[in-house]
């Protein structure tokens, strides 16, 4: 069998790729090596010399790779919003309006968010704009990875992350998305590294195809 096709992917797209990859491997007689991390963490390693065959990152990160001359074009895949989760069975706060969302954050004993993920970076700026940064920082648990895992253990009362990432964690209940007025939609996109095998392009096309829309919706996102 040919060398594995190396796919660098954001954690937010993990379940979608895991849904699509097995059938693709069987059909094409190949192995897809999937490496998951935040787009920012991947970009840091790429800057240090790491590479792959295809990247599934935020649209901004793919655009950066295009500017660097490492990727030829951007293919948009999915649109993802940020949500809140609590430990399974715990009371769900009302976050239906900006005012209620702020109250829920201030009332929580602890709030987990990511450090370098798109949701975490946005959340840090959001609490600054809302004027509650000092209060939230004092009880924040900053964690790169799945913040829902912290809530599932009972170590955080609220977990903030992409809904598609919260859905990957057993032992949490998703409260819902951020209020529309405060929401930030992240576009997840793909790019194929220059010189990559043609199967990398074929896989990206498969993820972007209409047949993958059901997997994208099932994992808390909308097709791009």
Image (cartoon, grey):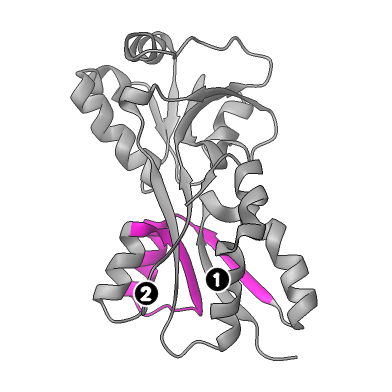
Instruction: Give the residue furthest to the right.
Output: 26
Query: What residue is shown at x 35% (from left), y 36% (from top)?
Result: 184
From the top left corner, tell me how far across and down residue 29 is, in percent: 77, 83
Q: Mark 1 and mark 2: span between their CA atoms?
A: 11 Å
From the top left corner, tell me how far across and down residue 112 is, in percent: 45, 30
Q: Earlier in the sequence, mark 1 or mark 2?
A: 2
User: Which of the 4 quarters of the picture holds residue 198?
Assistant: bottom right
Q: Secondary structure at mark 2?
A: loop
Tag shown at residue 65? none
Instruction: Find disc 2 in the rendering and name its residue.
Output: 73
Magenta region = 32-59
Q: Residues within 10 Å of mark 2 (few under 14, many from 20)?
A: some
Query: What residue is shown at x 74% (from left), y 81% (from top)?
Result: 28
Above or below, 144 against 14 in this view is above
Q: Is residue 212 left or right of residue 119?
A: right
Instruction: Find disc 1 in the rendering and name its residue.
Output: 204
Above or below, 104 against 10 in this view is above
Query: What residue is shown at x 56% (from left), y 79% (from top)?
Result: 200
């Amino acid at each position: 069998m040919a060398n594995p096709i190396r796919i660098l992917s954001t954690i937010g797209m993990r379940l979608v790729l895991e849904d699509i990859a097995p059938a693709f491997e069987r059909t094409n007689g190949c192995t897809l090596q999937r490496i998951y991390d935040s787009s920012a963490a991947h970009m840091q390693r790429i800057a240090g010399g790491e590479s792959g065959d295809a990247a599934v990152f935020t649209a901004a990160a793919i655009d950066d790779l295009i500017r660097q001359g490492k990727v030829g074009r951007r293919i948009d895949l999915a649109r993802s919003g940020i949500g809140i989760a609590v430990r399974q069975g715990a009371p769900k706060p009302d976050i239906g309006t900006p005012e209620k969302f702020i109250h829920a954050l201030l009332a929580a004993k602890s709030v987990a968010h990511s450090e370098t993920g798109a949701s975490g970076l946005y959340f840090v700026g959001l609490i600054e704009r809302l004027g509650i940064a000092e209060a939230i920082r004092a009880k924040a648990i900053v964690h790169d990875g799945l913040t829902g895992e912290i809530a599932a253990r009972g170590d955080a009362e609220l977990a903030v992350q992409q809904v598609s990432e919260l859905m990957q964690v057993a032992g949490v209940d998703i409260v819902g998305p951020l209020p529309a007025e405060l929401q930030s939609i992240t576009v997840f996109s793909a790019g194929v590294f220059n010189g990559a095998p043609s199967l990398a392009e074929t896989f990206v096309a498969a993820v972007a195809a209409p047949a993958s829309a059901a997997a994208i919706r099932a994992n808390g996102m909308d097709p791009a």
